[in-house]
Amino acid sequence: MSPPLNRSPCLAPPLRPSYNGGCDLISFRSAMTTLRVGNAADVSGGEALNLHEYQSKRIFARYGIPVPQGEVATTPEAARQIAARLGGPVVVKAQVLVGGRGKAGGIQLAQTPEEAEAVARRILGMRLKGLPVRKVLIDPAVTIRQEIYLGGVIDRAQGRIVMMASSEGGVDIEEVAARSPEKIVRVAVDPCLGLRAYHARHMAQTIGLPRAYFRPFAEIAQGLYRAMVENDASLAEINPLVITDEGTLVGVDGKMVVDDNALFRHPDIEKLRDAEEEDPFEVEARQHGLSYVKLTGNIGCMVNGAGLAMATMDIIKLYGGEPANFLDIGGGASATRVTAALRIILSDPNVRAVLINIFGGITRCDEVARGILAAMDEVQPQVPFVVRLIGTNQEEGQRLLSDAHLVTANTLAEAAQKVVRLAQGTS
């Protein structure tokens, strides 16, 4: 019997979980795609905190999952010392928050400490998908007999964690889902029941594991599920989980994505955030309590409320424009926060015009107007603004903006049309 979770979602009688039919392929692909983008953002207000491989595996180890006992190095000399301590062949692995490290040369085998130093020297400073490699993980090498995939992801349509396993380990699970979906077994786990040993044995049997591995596989799968639930993760995977020549199961690679909205419960995980690999604008936005996601268009957007922000981006698209960002200043935003928001928007060189759409309920329109004017004094923008202020103290806010000769609008449609024309260079 597996130990109870730290937080029990409910006390209702357990229900029988659904197996492969419980997570349709479309929602599965959608969930995996959403969670795999670099710094996946949730426009309801949070972002996904991606952990490095070595951080993920250290968390997995706390739940009884066998992982290599490697160490992290930031210099070639440190890599050589770690390899000497470990003894025998080692694997030098770039620690960056992107996939495809092996194909890009970011994972290499070294037979001796001297070779580990040389490999680390090549990898450190390498750029993988635009990100510089600042540290490497030195893991003891293992001899691999078989590679397996094991992971879990939140299926938002069902409101459950879906555990997945496949005999096709070592490759992106999305590739397997597209090419051979029948090779993935999925279990939609009832949160009241949790992942039981018989669920995991079903997964092991379906992917063709020998019976001798059913028990250790079940223990690993249950540990991974517990790691997800107790750390508020939206994704956790071991890829590959390998059977070694010695006949043991070892998780040689790992990934974990934690919901930003839950970090107040996990200060230890918050400390693992690698700000050096995040978009500097998103880091600054988070420091000011803003929800910001950079996009590829040329019209900057500042809105209060996630739903209104989405509607604003939609109507910009409707009139032929492309939003450059999602930015929600939230309710009751101060002039200081508004100033920070505009500074972030205007730091994007692609921005050709800015639309500010504020519905003043908690947020006062005159306070927003003062923030806009303060930001302009500080940043000295070279692009036009269109402002729509509706709600509390809107007359005072509109008067302040009118005195500053800013373009204003009374409706969202009018504002969108004006900003699209300005971004396109037409009046």
Image (cartoon, rainbow, N blue to C red):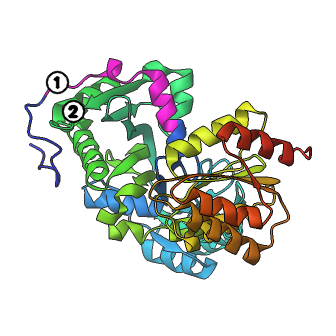
Residue 259 placed where, x, y %?
40, 53
The label number, if any, that marks residue 190 in the structure image: 2
Residue shown at 15%/36% (left/top)? 193
Residue 24 lies in the magenta-colored region: yes
Name the quadrant containing residue 160. top left
Picture quarter with the N terminus: top left
Q: Is residue 163 visible?
A: yes
Residue 337 placed where, x, y %?
56, 69
Q: Is residue 278 visible?
A: no
Name the quadrant containing residue 118. bottom right
Residue 316 placed where, x, y %?
71, 39
Q: Which residue is mark 1?
A: 16
Name the quadrant containing residue 281. bottom right
Question: What range is drawn magenta here?
Answer: 15-32
Q: Amino acid at mark 1?
A: Arg
Q: Is 133 situated above or below 161?
A: below
Mark 2 or 1, nearer chain start: 1
Contact flag, marks 2 and 1 (Cβ < 8 Å): yes
Q: Is 325 situated above or below 243?
A: below
